[in-house]
Amino acid sequence: MRLLSLPLCLSWVLTLCLAAPPHHKEGHSDPHHKEDYAHPDQHGHSDQHAHPEHSHHHDLVRCSGIEFDAITLDEHGVTYFIKDDHLWKGYRGSSEFTNQTFHELHGSIDAAFRMHHKVKPEDHDRVFIFKGDHVWSFYNHTLEDGFPKLINSEFPGIPNELDAAVECPSGECKTDSVLFFKGSHVYHYDLLTHSVKEKDWPAVMNCTSAYRWLERYFCFQGTKFQRFHPVTGHVSEGYPKDVRDYFMKCPDRGHGDKTREAHFGRCSGKPFDAFTADDEGKIYAFRGDYFLRLDTKRDGYHYWSITSNWKELHDHINAVFTWDHKMYFIQGDQVYIYKSDVHYTLVEGYPKPVEEELGVKGPVDAAFLCGNSHLVHIIQGKRMFDVDMSESPRKVVKEWPLPFDHVDAAMCGAEGIQVFIGDIYYEYKSPMLLATSRMQPFPHNTSKELLGCDN
């Protein structure tokens, strides 16, 4: 769990993670949506820029069954749904004319996406919008200098009159890339080499819009959508689904489970089973059969089934930590080791007994590893065992008594260690202070102070 090198501490990240995403089957979102409150004046564009035709504005009702022309996030994490010359911000509310936000656009568009290309900061986080044979680039809703441009001059080899487009960052694709859709054709555009590869994805529908959210990719056609893999084109089981049940608030529709939300939701107050972060700085919290990504403050907050990322884990976990680009999941008396890449591949030969792998007999209550240390600290009841991960075979090198009868979870961050017990957490500057402190630190409320909940 190498978090000391992360520039942001867990509490800062969690405090900002208050936005809520659309509703997908893997989990259920918080009822509060950042996008739902994204009124025009909050983003620097007011009605004074409205086109004269706005006086004749007729609001489209998206729950009636609209086929969107484009869906994209902007640089603030607000999701735009675009149809003809109308635009919706977020997952509920009325439409406005597109050129109230993007003033230079008039009429319908073909496709849109938010660029991910950090090596070229003048393009990164720009919203690219396509219409006919031209492309526009916007940042903070302002048209970039030199745009619009011909599509073929900005993206050589990509056809005009596209149907959809979606970004694919390095790690999810091999390099920073864009996927373009036209009819049954899919074009993979490498942003580094400017090379184009045409893909044959028979399982993917002819997308009229495409959308990436929290490393998940969606193709839309009419009122249906699929989740697909951006490299292989594999479509997840159970699709297509109806857009109106997941991406908007419609009367008498949806897929939510209030009982499940009450137990696993961000503000449920239930204990967490484990926390960790991978080597890319992605921070995870695990509760029951679900996990939360806690570092996605801009684009939203959501909980997903554990099996959606780590398909061999079919029950709640006891502890997890990261070491040497691998994630170690302890479940009962077994340990599962996954490569810490975006596809989370189980290492061959696992699971194995915890005692065989780590020298501690399972089950355990928590585990954490600080920064570049090679010691993983495993908590079991009122004891903490230090295991040297650099040794083979691994064994306990030190045992500490703890001032707690039981610990639910623990993790090490930029400001030290957080120990979680119920909905309370305590902070310590080091593992030694955790074990030797005679005075208990001030208790913090996890839901309120870390997750921003009102309860």
Image: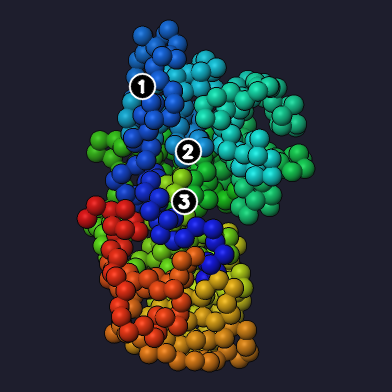
Query: Which callout, 1 or 2, points at the residue further toward the start of the chain?
Result: 1
Marks 2/3 in contact by CB < 8 Å: the verdict is no
The residue at which mark 3 appears reads as 296
- The reply to whether dot 3 and dot 1 touch (C-beta < 8 Å) is no
Which numbered disc, 2 or 3, marks the residue that appears first in the sequence? Answer: 2
Type of residue at label 1? Leu
x then y, percent, for residue 419: 37, 73
- Residue drawn at x 62%, y 84% is 390
Secondary element under disc 3, as helix, strand or loop, is loop
User: Residue 420, how many percent across, how many down?
Assistant: 34, 71
Q: Is residue 431 above or below residue 295?
A: below
Residue 251 visible in the shown view: yes
**Is residue 179 in view?**
no
Q: Which residue is mark 1?
A: 60
Residue visible at 37% across and 71% down in the picture: 427
Rounded to the nearest angstrom, the CA distance separating label 3 from label 1 is: 31 Å
Residue sitting at 40 percent across and 51 percent down? Answer: 17
Of 288 and 368, the residue lying toward us:
368
Q: Residues within 10 Å of mark 2 (few under 14, many from 20)?
A: some
Q: Secondary structure at mark 1?
A: loop
Nearer the observer: mark 3 or 1; the answer is 3
Q: Residues within 10 Å of mark 1 (few under 14, many from 20)?
A: some
Determine the CA span between mark 2 and mark 3. Answer: 12 Å
